[in-house]
Image (spheres, grey):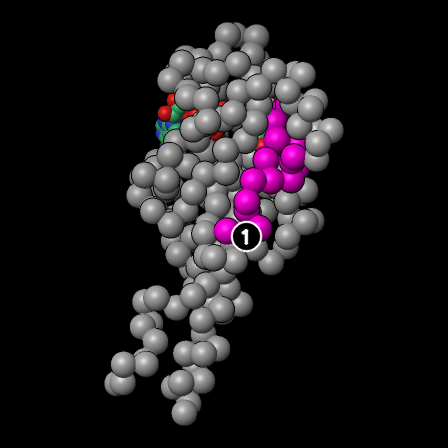
Amino acid sequence: MTDSTISHDKLARRGLLFILSSPSGAGKTTISRMLLGADEEIKLSVSATTRPPRPGEIDGVHYYFVDDAEFDRMVEEDDFYEWAPVFGHRYGTPKGRIRGALKEGQDFLFDIDWQGTQQLYQKDQQDVVRVFILPPSIAELERRLRSRGTDADDVIAARMERARAEISHWDAYDYVVINENVNACFAKVREILDAERMKRQRQTGLIPFVRELMN
Ligand SMILES: Nc1nc2c(ncn2[C@@H]2O[C@H](COP(=O)(O)OP(=O)(O)O)[C@@H](O)[C@H]2O)c(=O)[nH]1
Ligand SMILES: Nc1ncnc2c1ncn2[C@@H]1O[C@H](COP(=O)(O)OP(=O)(O)O)[C@@H](O)[C@H]1O
């Protein structure tokens, strides 16, 4: 091996847009937080929302909490990759510097619904990886929503009503994972991420590496 040999561990690659969606309460926020805590190469795409913060949610970390007027202004100024109404509030993905960062190998995690997933996929098919999380049963979904303790009864009823509609979009995703045991589900999501990172077309460093091998 010569000094010029490219390190296999450091091959350049393009970043990816890793989307986690699920019916509300199935566990995507839990899995997202586990992933962000365990993997330094992925960064959360922080959405803007007009929904009020839940206890423990921090502005700029979990969401950018904005009022209707600010959201209108962001729409007018074309600040969003995509946005959608969900549960009577609006949610949007700010453009930020995603495109430039992707080229530098930065991965982004998106906790967005099926509408946002479709819009992102239409804009950037090559970089998007779509993962859908299902609950083990409808009864367990309701139990989780109640145990979270963040929503009033009428909000829980609305989320349950919507869950069936959300589940109907399962087949617009690349991967579907059932979240029965949270650690098992997390392990599967990590495997998907690891495998997707190794896809040949993302590994921009492979061409010079292989060229060197063949010389
Ligand atoms: N389209 C879109 N959906 C989003 C965005 N941010 C969050 N969501 C979705 O909005 C829904 C409601 O989110 P939230 O109020 O945090 O409740 P959750 O269902 O408990 O996660 C979830 O399905 C999220 O995935 C966004 O930027 N765009
Ligand atoms: N596999 C699991 N088993 C039991 N409870 C879970 C599991 N995954 C998530 N939860 C709990 O269910 C509730 C809803 O999860 P959350 O991640 O907030 O869902 P979502 O973001 O999809 O709405 C939370 O209280 C969370 O701690």
Q: Residue at x 70, y 22 (%)?
A: 72
Instruction: Classify residue 208 by image quadrant.
Output: bottom left
Tell me the amino acid under the disc marked 1. Answer: Gly
Q: Quadrant of residue 76?
A: top right
Residue 145 magenta: no
Q: In the image, what residue occupies the spot 47% across and 57% down?
A: 104
Q: Is residue 175 visible from the viewing direction of this image?
A: no
Residue segment shown in magenta: 79-101
Q: Mark 1 near ligand 1 (CB under 8 Å)? A: no
- Residue ID for mark 1: 100
How crowded pointer 1 is (Cα within 10 Å; few <14, some 14-19, many 20+) is rated as few
Residue at left 26%, top 85%? Answer: 1
99 vs 196, left or right, is right
Judged from the image, the quadrant occupied by ligand 1 is: top right
**x and y percentages locating residue 102 in the rendered image:** 52, 54
Going by the picture, which residue comes out furthest to the right? 76
Image location of residue 88, percent across then percent down? 65, 17
* x and y, in percent, of residue 138 in the image: 51, 26
The quadrant in which the C terminus is found is bottom left
Position of residue 211 relative to residue 47, above or below, is: below
Residue 83 pos. (x, y %):
66, 32
Residue 54 sits above or below residue 104 on the image: above
Residue at (61, 31) in percent of width and height: 92
Farthest residue, direction top: 153
Q: Is residue 96 visible?
A: yes
Extreme residue toward the bottom, this view: 215
Q: Secondary structure at mark 1?
A: helix
Where residue 35 sits, quadrant-wise, is top left
Total residue callouts: 1
In front here: 49 or 196? 49
Instruction: Let me know if residue 94 is in the magenta part.
Output: yes
